[in-house]
């Protein structure tokens, strides 16, 4: 009797206890090493279902979208989902005053209305193979690093050449993993006729804008729909009107069953870059120097932009995309720095390094962490100056224009289009104010040894940055749209004598001479030391599963639906609904002004519980945007598009309590296509699992 109660209690506990969160972004080809754990967490498919070169597998339905996002195939006619923010530039390119697809959305009502996007590609991973032996063939330990590099390069080039077939769209790359302790060959088939099928209005696809970016509760309908086209043989082809929809080896079926806390989730996509195995010195630099300084500089820039944007709707449009770009990393860094501090990652890594050195004593890895520390000590002042330079002087738009125009003239490229696109979105008062704020910050925060001589001389001559600014903007030809547009090669001497070019170039030369050599030397040494340190960490902890840092190659991240507590007495539940959109709705706030159609649908009733987004514990990073989120049966339940800012240190250290990825609930996508897009014809080709 007692025993039965205990068992029942245990079973009940197992039912309501969420499963432990999962750190890691795993290589699909090695998924057999994780599959048991995935299955223990609820996954019902096999390793072969996830990745196989012998049969169609889930990997055949996932693509690298463009060069920095992920997408997934959802029909046997090559229909593709990704994020709105991933298709943004394509949607923008098709937009004009008469057809403002960004604002109003776009829906093809038949295949003939789908819009081509020159330059856009999607890449399917054909296979990935470990090629470490072949890449290192001919290398022996007596060789110098330079010799090793040339062996690696020659072997890699030969491997790539033996498999790549540009005519057939087959591209190949050899990628170094685990700090070049292993090499993998990735073979891709690249399709280049990819057409826009649909996009919601930005007031849905970008709902919440930068106010809600990196945040929960979130209500962004961040999706867009494309279709892959192929030649009649189903192979990659240049755009042609008579190309046919691509027939995939595999596509995702869609689950409408919905998600709840604890459900298994699997994100299959291409995270861009992480550094999980670095030393305490790197983490300290990021968390205590780089992030806080860059955040402070960007706060100043954002405030200046916002001040003018609030005064004039035209300026607001001009700077909305620029402002969003500046704000995106700005917000991410805040979460990263806070997370590193909260987790005491520097101290934790220091303790780890002490244990490591105890273990390494007397062996070949002894003193490795100290050698790494010495390189950082040498690198950091120069690296900090470089970062300061990129976040200050390089952000002044007039100087950027001077640099670009000079490059175009020398490269014999036309200047008029450059001038056209620059001045369309240029507001000089913003730029002038940023010039002063950024150069003053540079002056205040850089030690004299880390300032260009030119900068010191000019500043001394002018007496203040403001006086320098007044003179520069008064004299520079680059403030004059017509003059810039009319520049030809014959005007190069005039450009070279311009005060904007002079300033731009003086800083660049300083960077080239004073900073770059130090930084590059240090990077080379770090690369070498990290190769040892990575291998050493694997030997130090033989029982631990090490996933390779992200590098935009295909990865598997599994976890489960889960809320989180960002601070004391606050708990977030993991599913947001249409009701929340209505709570935020406000015609006077740009980020929260929803389409009238959505208000009307809601007012008609019955949609309060319509799910919109959900949180899970998958370990994702930039590049995972657009990734399919899959349930235990391999069916599509969502599209990944963001993380919560409190967990963005996951690129360096993963914390199961705070790290959450944010996904669009696939049922909201279906709702928007049906109710807002009236493009229900697309459902005919989708397959629904339930
Ligand atoms: N934070 C997401 C990512 O890093 C979305 C960015 C686009 N959205 C925006 N409001 N800026 O890419
Ligand atoms: N929003 C990111 C992306 O565009 C995803 C992330 O950083 O979590 O890839």
Image (tube, grey):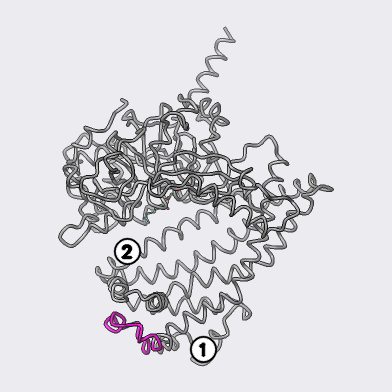
Q: Position of residue 17 (x, y in %)?
A: 51, 28
Say which mark, if any, is on residue 236.
none
Task: Please name whichever residue, 567 or 549, is drawn nearer the observer in this view of the structure.
Answer: 549
Q: Gap between marks 1 and 2, in whole Å? A: 33 Å
Q: Position of residue 309 (x, y in %)?
A: 31, 69
User: How many other residues sit within 10 Å of disc 2, few (<14), some (14-19) or many (≥20)?
Assistant: some
Mark 1 or 2: the one toward you: 1
In the image, the segment drawn in magenta is 472-494
Residue drawn 41% across and 61% down? 327
Task: Please name whichever residue, 62 or 249, is drawn nearer the observer in this view of the structure.
Answer: 249
The quadrant the N terminus occupies is: top right
484 lies above or below 26: below
Say which mark, if any, is on residue 320.
2
* Chief SS of the magenta region: helix
In this rendering, would 251 be left or right of 273? left
Quick check: is 476 in the magenta stretch? yes
Task: Please name whichever residue, 142 or 123, is drawn nearer the observer in this view of the structure.
Answer: 142
Which residue matches tag 1? 458
User: How many other residues sit within 10 Å of disc 1, few (<14), some (14-19) or many (≥20)?
Assistant: some
In this rendering, would 587 be left or right of 394? left
Residue pushed farthest right?
362
**In this view of the protein, can residue 389 be seen by the observer?**
yes
**In this view of the protein, can residue 216 be seen by the observer?**
no
């Amino acid at each position: 009797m007692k025993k039965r109660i205990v068992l029942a209690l245990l079973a009940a506990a197992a039912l309501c206890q969420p499963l432990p969160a999962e750190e890691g972004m795993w290589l699909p080809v090695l998924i057999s090493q994780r599959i048991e754990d995935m299955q223990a967490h609820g996954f019902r498919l096999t390793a072969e279902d996830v990745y196989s070169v012998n049969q169609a597998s889930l990997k055949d339905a996932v693509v690298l979208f463009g060069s920095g996002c992920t997408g997934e195939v959802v029909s046997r006619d090559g229909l593709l989902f990704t994020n709105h923010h991933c298709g943004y530039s394509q949607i923008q390119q098709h937009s004009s005053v008469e057809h403002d697809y960004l604002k109003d959305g776009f829906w093809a009502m038949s295949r003939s209305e789908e819009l081509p996007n020159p330059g856009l590609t999607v890449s399917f991973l054909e296979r990935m193979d470990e090629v470490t032996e072949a890449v290192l063939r001919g290398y022996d330990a007596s060789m110098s690093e330079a010799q090793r590099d040339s062996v690696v390069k020659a072997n890699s080039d030969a491997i790539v050449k033996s498999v790549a077939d540009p005519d057939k769209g087959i591209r190949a790359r050899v990628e170094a993993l685990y700090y070049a302790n292993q090499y993998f060959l990735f073979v891709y088939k690249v399709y280049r006729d990819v057409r826009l099928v649909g996009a919601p209005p930005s007031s849905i696809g970008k709902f919440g804008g930068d106010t809600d970016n990196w945040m929960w509760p979130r209500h962004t309908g961040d999706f867009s729909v494309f279709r892959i086209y192929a030649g009649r043989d189903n192979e990659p082809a240049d755009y042609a009107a008579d190309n046919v929809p691509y027939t995939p080896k595999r596509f995702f079926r869609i689950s409408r069953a919905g998600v709840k806390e604890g459900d298994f989730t699997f994100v299959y996509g291409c995270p861009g870059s992480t550094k999980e195995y670095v030393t305490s010195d790197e983490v300290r630099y990021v968390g205590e120097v780089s992030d806080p300084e860059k955040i402070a500089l960007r706060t100043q820039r954002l405030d200046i932009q916002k001040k003018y944007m609030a005064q004039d709707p035209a300026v607001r449009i001009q700077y909305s995309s620029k402002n969003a770009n500046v704000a995106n990393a700005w917000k991410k860094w805040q979460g990263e720095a806070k997370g590193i501090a909260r987790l005491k990652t520097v101290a934790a890594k220091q303790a780890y390094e002490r244990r490591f050195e105890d273990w390494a004593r007397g062996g070949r890895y002894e003193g490795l962490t100290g050698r790494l520390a010495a390189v950082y000590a040498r690198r950091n002042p120069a690296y900090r100056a470089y970062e300061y330079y990129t976040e200050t002087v390089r952000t002044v738009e007039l100087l950027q224009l001077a640099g670009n125009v000079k490059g175009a003239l020398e490269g014999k490229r036309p200047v008029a289009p450059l001038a056209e696109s620059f001045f369309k979105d240029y507001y000089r008062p913003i730029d002038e104010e940023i010039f002063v704020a950024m150069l003053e910050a540079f002056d205040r925060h850089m030690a004299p040894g880390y300032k260009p001589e030119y900068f010191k001389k000019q500043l001394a001559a002018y007496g203040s940055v403001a006086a320098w600014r007044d003179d520069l903007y008064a004299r520079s030809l680059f403030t004059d749209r017509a003059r810039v547009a009319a520049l030809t090669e014959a005007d190069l001497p005039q450009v070279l004598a311009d005060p904007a070019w002079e300033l731009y170039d003086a800083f660049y030369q300083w960077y080239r001479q004073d900073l770059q050599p130090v930084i590059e030397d240090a990077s080379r040494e770090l690369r070498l030391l990290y190769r040892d340190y990575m291998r050493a960490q694997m030997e130090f902890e033989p029982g631990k599963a090490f996933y390779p840092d992200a590098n935009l190659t295909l990865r598997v991240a599994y976890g489960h639906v889960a809320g989180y507590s960002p601070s004391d007495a606050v708990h977030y539940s993991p599913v947001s609904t249409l009701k929340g959109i209505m709570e935020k709705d406000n015609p006077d706030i740009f980020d929260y002004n929803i389409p009238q159609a959505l208000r009307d649908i809601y007012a008609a009733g019955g949609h309060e519980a319509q799910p919109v987004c959900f949180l899970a514990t998958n370990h994702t990073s930039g590049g995972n945007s657009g990734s399919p989120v899959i349930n235990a049966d391999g069916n599509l339940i969502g599209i990944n598009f963001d993380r919560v800012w409190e967990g963005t240190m996951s690129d360096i250290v993963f914390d199961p309590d705070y790290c959450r990825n944010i996904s669009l609930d696939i049922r909201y996508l279906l709702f928007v296509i049906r109710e807002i897009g009236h493009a229900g014809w697309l459902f005919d080709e989708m397959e629904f699992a339930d």
